[in-house]
Image (spheres, grey):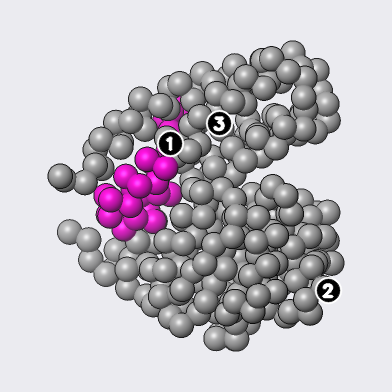
Amino acid sequence: MTTFADHSPRAWPGYFLKYSCLLKGLNILVAEDNLINQKIANYILTKQGAKVQNAVNGMEAVQMIENHTPIDIILMDLQMPGMDGIEAATRIRKDLGSNVPIIALTADLYANESQECAAAGINACIAKPFEPEALCDLILQLTGRKEQNTPILL
Amino acid sequence: MTTPPVDLSYVYELSGNDNGYVYNIISLFLESISPLFGELNALVAETEDYEPIANQAHFLKSSSMVVKIRDMHANMAKLESMARAKADMADLRALMQVVMHNYSEALPVLKAELEKNKPAA
């Protein structure tokens, strides 16, 4: 029988998703062209009470911000076809003047990518596949719902 | 100890014992990601077009972190890196053979997992 005290690695993520609702009321844009990764992110975020919208490339993400779609935070894949995450973030910051927090989703963060992210105005990076708790914690920090108490990878 | 052909622990952990969710992820993988292995294999076997090979390898590398086919993430990272460096196509083709071998071993396991998690009618 699984109990609440069962914190084994296999039991914990599902437990976290089932019994928390940390992101209730947040509008989150997931810009990710890979359907599997998009579905994973959507699952984690909606289980936590967030409203999720999706874009499959950087241009769609930029257009949503340009059209004043209510978005509290963006999860942005770095490598997407057409317009990638770095260019989209740059446009959102420089052309649109938006300060919506942006988290980069990355498979491998190389040193030069980290610098590019910072230059593009990306607030934080998280490696895929992400742990639900780490992702939610980062979102809460960047949306001002929680004090920043853990290092952000940039 | 031999590594299993596919590791679905991340999907199972995330699902919190929701078989329907596991079914959906495997199903999505088989429908949308599986064909890309064949496409990448054809690109590597029949062309010397490095950029699409690198891009496809990157995409599959990203997918392989959820449905973890044996050595797929490392092999795709290597293939992407070799393609970006315009390495000898013979080396890319040799690596692609390993990728397709591992993929062919994972496929029946994935189909069995799909059946195991199939929602009751």
Magenta region: which residues? Answer: B2-28
What percent of the width, then of the height, locates residue A96? Answer: 78, 76
Examine the residues drawn in magenta and state their main secondary structure.
helix
Residue A108 appears in the picture as rendered: no
Image point (65%, 35%), residue name: B56
Instruction: Please determine whether, in this image, residue A84 is positioned above or below residue B85.
Output: below
What percent of the width, then of the height, locates residue B24? Answer: 35, 47
The residue that label 2 is drawn on is A94
Other residues around mark 1 within 10 Å, as few (<14) / some (14–19) / many (≥20)? few
- Screen quadrant of the N terminus of chain A: bottom left
Instruction: Please determine whether, in this image, residue A148 is positioned above or below residue A6.
Output: below
Q: Is B69 within the magenta?
A: no
Cα–Cα span, label 1 and label 2:
39 Å
Q: Amino acid at mark 2?
A: Lys
The residue that label 3 is drawn on is B36
Q: Amino acid at mark 3?
A: Leu
Q: Quadrant of residue B92?
A: top right
- Mark 3 vs 1: CB contact within 8 A: no
- Screen quadrant of the C terminus of chain A: bottom right
* Label 3 element class: helix
Q: Quadrant of residue A77?
A: bottom right
The residue that label 1 is drawn on is B31
Q: Residue furthest front?
A: A67
Sequence-wise, the earlier of marks 3 and 1 is: 1
The chain that hosts pointer 2 is A
Q: Amino acid at mark 1?
A: Glu
Image point (46%, 73%), residue name: A51
* Label 1 element class: helix
Image point (42%, 35%), residue name: B30
What percent of the width, then of the height, locates residue B80? Answer: 72, 33
Tags 3 and 1 on a common chain? yes
